Each structure stands twice: as structure tokens, then as C-alpha cells.
Image (cartoon, helix red, strand yellow):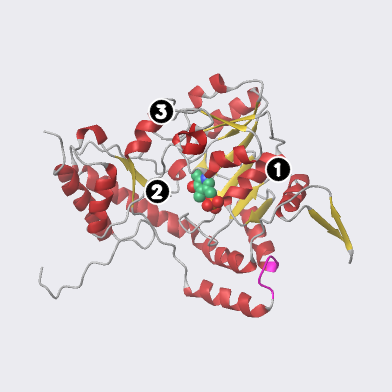
């Protein structure tokens, strides 16, 4: 390569696509005189409700508070247990602790990397109130099996669908089916409101209660009426953020189609002879249900003389961003102090130690994916134990 060649730009792990029309729309909101929760929030909620088959939807300022509020709506509190996965963003189980309940982790299925539903029933006790599955990377947990278990044991379900907006189950959209469904619109997710989240509810009574939890428990009536019967928080989304979301949602299918196309490119490249024998565990080849929120490989850790952090550092030096989604939740200090330890969930721990998220976002190109696979192949090939 000549010294004057244009340097290859850094390929980030992900990046949001915000179009000019959206940016102009945000400008209009800022100039309108009403910038916090208002008409744009209502418009976004109406759009989301339509998307979710007419179910009530309320938006919030994160996908974390949506889950916490869902647990409160389900009546989960001290003395109760909630079954979830150790392989998720720590928010999933933090909210269980936040409402005073206890997370009960169930090990994963190493192929889907989601909670192993075959192990869930054995974890149910008289204290269990809810199931909180996570659709890691957007790959949906089997909803038929999940709701069969919930029904049999009379449990509520809070779907942590933070990553699976745009995924489907049985041909129906995640959010259009099920009990509570929580979405996140963090900038790394497939569509964004900068920060934000949405909760899909079952009826108007739940929606009204969710609104109270969203804003200090306040219920207004007439010109001057105000009642506060429950303690709420400050979880409302701004109209500025809602306007960003309104510009994203019409493009959901386009974004997700592009993500799927890039996932196919990764499979093709990893299947090619040069990519063989890397010992990588690829994600399930699902082109029906998932929104391809992430493309995650599991490195052959024990066969390598380099640690995952070393692989990430070398990729970074080659101009490629990667991520870890996620360290095992039960091994964080807060959870260790509550009694969990190494070896409790060996399948999740093995995956969590070795999982690596590769770049995947709509404006990425085939050439970008080729570069990722080329660099990763070179790094791994140079570091196999002899
Ligand atoms: C992003 C995410 C959340 C939390 O969403 P925020 O909007 O960042 O609060 C929860 N669970 C999972 C699995 C996530 O990926």
C-alpha cells in the first residue's frame, strides 16, 4: 500500500442511522416551545401500539425502567423470585433486586445462548412470581414453550425484548403477543430514541398505572385536580427523543433487512475455506425470527494462546471495534455478595468468557465484513496452541 493511500476509517461495533429528515424534525420540536413529553410522545405511542397489534404501549426514558415498572405492575416485590438468565445486560436482574425480589438464574442453551427453557420448571418454587427471559442478539426465546410454562404455573412474564424489536415468533411480531413486553431504544439497538424504552401492556388499567409509575404517581383531572396514590419515579421520554424515534420506525424493516444481509455475508465468509478450523461457534442461522441485533461468535478460548481482551485489542489496532455482550451477571460483585459463585451456571460462564460481538449495523458494507473476518482469522490463526 502506498504511503498516500487513504487510511481505512475505523469500523465501529455499531452506529445509529439518523437521517436528515429526522434531524430537521428534531429542529422543529426544539423550536416548537414544547420539548419534554407531549404530542410526539403520544404519536410514538400510537405508532408502537399499531405495530403491536393494537395493544397499549407506553414509552419511557429507558428500557431498564420499563422492566422495573412491569415487575411492579405484576405485583413482584420482597419475598418473591423471578426466573431469568445469567447471560444478559445486568439491567435485567438489577431491576429484580430493585423491586426487592430475588433473581433465580437458570443456565443457558449454549446454541441459542438464551435461557434454557428445559431447565426452568425445576427452578420454580412457591415464591416464583414471574419469568423474565431475554432475546439475546434479537433471537427470540421460544414463546410457545415459555407461555406454556407460565400458564401451567400461573406466572407473569416480563419479556426483556430490549434487543428483539422487529423479531417475530410464529409469524407474529414480538410485542404483538405475550404478557408484558419491554423494548429498549438505546442507540445500540436496531432503532433508537437516543435513550428510551417502551412497555407493551395488556389493558388500559395497566397502562394508567404505568403512567403513574412513570411520573411521580400523579393523576390529573380537570384544570386543577391532582392525586397521588402511589410512589412513582421520573421516567418520562422527551418529545425530542420521541421525534428521533418517529424517524426511525418507518425504516425498521429496511434496517433489519440490511442487518440480515450482513449476517449472511458473515456466515458465507466464515464458511469459506480461509475461515475454516477457527473453532468459532457461530450464532444460529436464523433468517426467520431474529432481527439480527448482533452477530456474536464464541472464541475457542482454551485452544488459544491469546485472551479475548488481546483479540479485541488487536482488532482495535486494525481499526475494528468489537464488544462483549455480556459478562455473566451472577459473577459481578453485587451478585457474588448475594451468594452466587463461579461454576453455578457453567454453560453461561463458558460462553460469557469467550463471546465476542462483531460489527453489524445497517450502513456497514460487505467490504467491512470481509475486513473483520480477514483480521479475526489472521489473529486466531497466529495464536492457536501447538
Ligand atoms: C439495552 C438492554 C437493556 C436496557 O435498556 P436501556 O434502554 O439501556 O435501559 C436491558 N436488557 C437488555 C438485554 C438490553 O440489551
Q: Which mark is residue 342?
A: 3
Question: Which of the two discs, 2 and 1, sits closer to the camera?
Answer: 2
Q: Residues within 10 Å of mark 3 (few under 14, many from 20)?
A: few
- Give the residue number, with chain letter if any, for mark 1: 202
Identify the element where label 2 is drawn: loop
**Main SS category, magenta section:** loop
Residue 277 place in picture, x, y as percent: 18, 37
Q: Quadrant of the C terminus?
A: top left
Left or right of 131: which side holds 304? left
**For the residue with label 3, is its CB less than 8 Å from the closest atom of ligand 1?**
no
Residue under the image location 54 percent in, 44 percent down: 91
| Residue that sits furthest to the front in the current view | 337
Q: Earlier in the sequence, mark 2 or mark 3?
A: 2
Q: CA distance from mark 2 to mark 1?
A: 29 Å
Residue 180 place in picture, x, y as percent: 64, 41
- Give the residue number, with chain letter if any, for mark 2: 294
Q: Residues within 10 Å of mark 2 (few under 14, many from 20)?
A: many
Q: Which residues are magenta?
A: 34-39
Q: Earlier in the sequence, mark 1 or mark 3?
A: 1
Q: Earlier in the sequence, mark 2 or mark 1?
A: 1
Identify the element where label 3 is drawn: loop
Q: Is residue 188 above or below residue 302?
A: below
Q: Is residue 331 above or below residue 273?
A: above
Answer with the quarter of the image where residue 46 lies: bottom right
Amino acid at each position: 500500500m502506498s504511503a498516500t493511500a487513504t487510511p481505512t476509517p475505523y469500523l465501529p461495533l455499531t452506529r445509529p442511522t439518523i437521517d436528515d429528515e429526522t434531524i430537521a424534525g428534531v429542529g422543529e420540536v426544539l423550536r416548537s416551545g414544547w420539548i419534554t413529553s407531549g404530542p410526539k410522545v403520544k404519536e410514538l405511542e400510537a405508532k408502537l401500539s399499531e405495530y403491536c397489534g393494537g395493544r397499549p404501549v407506553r414509552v419511557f426514558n429507558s428500557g431498564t425502567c420499563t422492566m422495573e415498572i412491569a415487575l411492579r405492575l405484576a405485583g413482584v416485590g420482597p419475598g418473591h423470585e423471578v426466573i431469568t438468565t445469567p447471560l444478559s445486560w445486568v439491567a435485567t436482574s438489577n431491576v429484580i433486586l430493585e423491586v426487592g425480589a430475588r433473581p433465580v438464574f437458570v443456565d443457558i442453551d449454549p446454541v441459542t445462548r438464551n435461557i434454557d427453557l428445559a431447565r426452568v420448571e425445576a427452578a420454580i418454587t412457591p415464591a416464583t412470581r414471574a419469568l423474565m427471559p431475554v432475546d439475546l442478539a434479537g433471537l427470540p426465546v421460544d414463546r410457545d414453550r415459555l407461555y406454556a410454562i407460565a400458564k401451567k404455573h400461573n406466572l407473569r412474564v416480563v419479556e426483556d425484548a430490549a434487543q428483539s424489536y422487529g423479531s417475530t415468533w410464529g409469524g407474529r411480531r414480538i410485542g404483538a403477543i405475550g404478557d408484558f413486553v419491554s423494548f429498549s431504544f438505546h442507540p445500540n439497538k436496531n432503532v433508537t430514541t437516543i435513550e428510551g424504552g417502551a412497555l407493551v401492556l395488556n389493558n388500559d388499567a395497566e397502562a394508567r398505572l404505568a403512567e403513574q409509575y412513570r411520573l411521580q404517581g400523579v393523576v390529573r383531572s380537570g384544570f386543577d385536580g391532582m392525586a397521588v396514590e402511589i410512589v412513582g419515579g421520573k421516567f418520562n421520554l422527551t418529545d425530542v427523543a420521541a421525534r428521533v424515534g418517529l424517524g426511525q420506525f418507518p425504516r425498521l424493516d429496511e434496517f433489519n433487512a440490511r442487518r440480515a444481509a450482513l449476517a449472511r455475508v458473515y456466515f458465507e465468509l466464515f464458511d469459506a475455506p480461509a475461515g475454516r478450523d477457527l473453532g468459532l461457534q457461530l450464532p444460529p442461522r436464523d433468517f426467520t425470527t431474529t432481527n439480527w441485533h448482533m452477530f456474536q461468535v464464541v472464541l475457542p478460548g482454551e485452544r488459544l494462546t491469546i485472551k479475548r481482551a488481546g483479540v479485541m485489542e488487536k482488532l482495535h489496532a486494525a481499526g475494528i471495534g468489537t464488544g462483549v455482550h455480556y459478562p455473566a451477571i451472577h459473577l459481578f460483585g453485587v451478585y457474588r455478595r448475594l451468594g452466587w459463585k463461579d461454576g453455578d451456571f457453567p454453560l453461561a460462564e463458558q460462553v460469557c468468557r469467550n463471546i465476542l460481538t462483531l460489527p453489524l449495523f445497517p450502513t456497514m458494507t460487505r467490504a467491512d465484513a470481509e475486513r473483520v473476518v480477514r483480521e479475526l482469522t489472521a489473529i486466531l490463526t497466529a495464536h492457536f496452541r501447538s
